[in-house]
Image: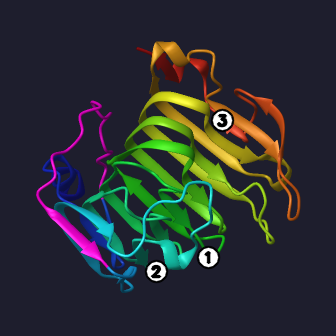
Amino acid sequence: MLMKQLRTLGIAVCLANQCTTDAVAPMPTGNWPKSQGNVKYPAPKVIPAKTVFDGGMKTYERSDISCKENQEGGKSGALFILKAGATLQNVIVGPRQQDGVHCEEHDCTIKNVWWADVCEDALSIIGGSANSVSNVIGGGAKLANDKIIQHNGPGTVNIEGFYAEDFGKLYRSCGKCKTQYPRAVKLTNIYAVDPKVTVVAVNSNYNDKATLTNVKIDKASKNKPVCEYTKGSTNAEPSVLGKGPSGSVCNYKTSTVTYV
C-alpha cells in the first residue's frame, strides 16, 4: 500500500540503492527549448562516474573545433564524455562539436538533452556488458545526416519521450564494429519528423531486439520504414534484410504507430 501511495505522489522509491519510478517521459510536442546562455569548452568535458551534470538549459559547444560532417571525430571530438553511471541533464548541444556526447562505459542517463544540429552522431554508447542499461529520457535532436544514437557496446538502451527531426536514423545498432554483440533498444513515446532512412536499425544476425511503443511520425514520411533489420558485420558495410514488424528483432504492432 505504501509503495502504491508513493508512486501515486510521483516519488521515486529506492530499493537496494536503485531508484525506480513508474513515470514514463510523455510524448514530446515538438517545441524546442530556449537557451539560457552559452558555454564553450576547449576539450571534452568529462562527467565522472555516478555523478550528475546539470547544464541549466544552456547551449554547450567546443571552442577549438567545428563540425566536419561524415568524418569520425572519436573521443577527441566529443563535447561531453560520461563515465559509468553518470547523468547528463538539461543541456542544449550546439553545432560546434564533432561527436556530440559519448557514454564511454555504458550505464549512462541522458535526460532532457537537446542537439540543435547533429554532426557525426548525437550520442555514442560504448563499452559496458550484456547487463548494461543506458537511458535517454526526454530531449530531442535535429539535422542529423546519419544517426542520432549510435550503440556500439552490448546491453540495452531505453529511449522515451524523445523528439527527432530531419535525421537519417534515430537509433542504430552498430552495423560495422570490430566486435559485435546482441543489443536491445526500447523506444516509447517517440515523435519523429522527416526520417530519411528509418527510425530504428538493428542487426538480426546478432539477435538484436527492438521494441517500439507509441511512435508518432509526420504524414509526409508514411512510406519510410519504422524499423529496419540488417545483416551486420565486423568488417563490411551492413546489408538490409527487411523492414517492418518481424518477431523480436522489430517488435511492434502497426497500431502503435500513428501519422500526424
Which-is-in-front pick, marks 3 and 2?
A: 2
- Report the residue at 11% width, 57% height from top: 36
Which-is-in-front pick, marks 1 and 3?
A: 1
When asked about the image quadrant of residue 218, the answer is top left
Query: Which residue in the protein does label 1 denote?
Result: 127
Instruction: Using the numbered discs, state the Cα–Cα distance from disc 1 to disc 3 in whole angstroms.
Output: 25 Å
Query: Which residue in the protein does label 2 denote?
Result: 84
State if disc 2 and disc 1 touch (CB < 8 Å): yes
Query: Which residue in the protein does label 3 denote?
Result: 251
- In reply to whether residue 24 is colored magenta, the answer given is yes
Q: Position of residue 120 (x, y in %)?
A: 55, 57
Identify which amino acid the numbered label 2 is placed on. Ala
Q: Is residue 121 left or right of residue 175?
A: left
Q: Earlier in the sequence, mark 1 or mark 2?
A: 2
Q: Position of residue 190 (x, y in %)?
A: 43, 35
- Report the residue at 40% width, 14% height from top: 260
Q: Position of residue 185 (x, y in %)?
A: 58, 50
Q: Which residues are magenta?
A: 21-41
Identify which amino acid the numbered label 1 is placed on. Gly
Instruction: Using the numbered discs, state the Cα–Cα distance from disc 1 to disc 2 in whole angstroms.
Output: 9 Å
The label on residue 118 is none
- Report the residue at 13% width, 50% height from top: 9
Identify which amino acid the numbered label 3 is placed on. Asn
Q: Is residue 108 above or below residue 171?
A: below
Q: Residues within 10 Å of mark 3 (few under 14, many from 20)?
A: some
